[in-house]
Amino acid sequence: MAKDLWSKYDKEVVTNGIFIERWDSLKYYSHKESKRKLLNYIKENNKIVIDENTLILGWSRRFVEYKRPLAILGDVERFKKIAQDKDKKVVIVYSSIVNKTYDRENHFIKELEDIIDNGLKENIIFIPNYDMDIAKMMTAGCDVWLNTPEVGREACGTSGMKACLNGVLPLSTSDGWIDEVDLTNIGWKVQDGEITKNLLDILEQSIIPSYYDDKDNWNEMIKNSRNLILNQFSTERMLNEYIKKMYLPIFSKSSH
């Protein structure tokens, strides 16, 4: 996208990173402990009890159109059929800040509430008043991180980095930082066209069987996702790249 917008200029690319120490819950707690913390919060605040062995998908960021917060719910009946399997239940946890001046955002919230009221109160949870504490809790306590922007619209998507750091596996369109990564044995890339069908296909045919029936593979993916962030997407790496690619060449030119 940047190449098209500023085609006349030379460019160097430096991908964002995250401050590992701030977001690394897995360093101090097991994933089960972090998940238990999230589920206890939901029990206290949403009055919904969720078994800790249930597959939890997370989506927390601004409810804006290009991020497509409800993409996976575009076929409510199919989602309901998948999510309410008595042996392999699925729960999606949403969180956002509601901007009262942004009508489209309020429309998404109302649409989500209507979907929840359509027999999905135990499968879709909305946590209001999204803040840093909720962000840390969700990026550490879910099992899968949903990221569904229209391809070409997402600047980076650092919440997915925070989730991967904590072993929360990505399910994402190929945009932002995800576009730079091979997600084999780490997570799942979803094709942008027919987004609802593609998301539900991956959920039903790959994610659910892996989570419930192949824990060894799931745990291996958790390790791989964490190592990806530690090795490639820290702020330390980002700052080093800025120094080498941006600042040092500028200083070198100015000294001549």
Image (cartoon, rainbow, N blue to C red):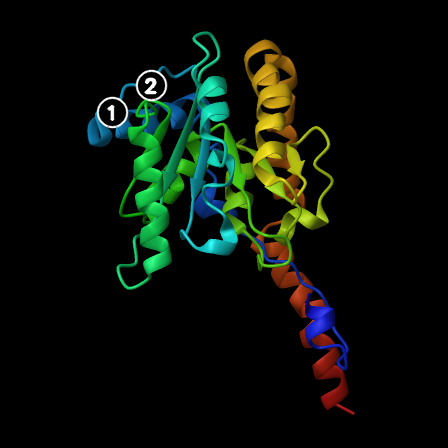
In the figure, 10 relative to 65: above or below?
below
Image position, residue 7 (x, y; %): 76, 77
Image position, residue 201 (x, y; %): 62, 26
Q: Is residue 170 visible?
A: yes
- Distance Cα–Cα, label 2 vs label 1: 8 Å
Inspect the image, locate mark 2, and give the three-letter code of the amino acid beneath it. Ile
Residue count near mark 1 (Cα–Cα under 10 Å), binned few <14, some 14–19, many ≥20: few
Q: Residue at 27% across / 48% down in the picture?
A: 129
Answer whether labels 2 and 1 touch (C-beta < 8 Å): yes
Residue 73 or 8: which is nearer the viewer? Answer: 73
Image position, residue 126 (x, y; %): 32, 37
Q: Is residue 133 visible?
A: no
Q: Residue at 63% across / 40% down in the picture?
A: 194
Which mark is drawn over residue 43? 1
Q: Looking at the rendering, in which quadrant would you find the C terminus?
A: bottom right
Residue 66 or 17: which is nearer the viewer? Answer: 66
Which mark is drawn over residue 50? 2
What kind of element bears circle 1? Answer: helix
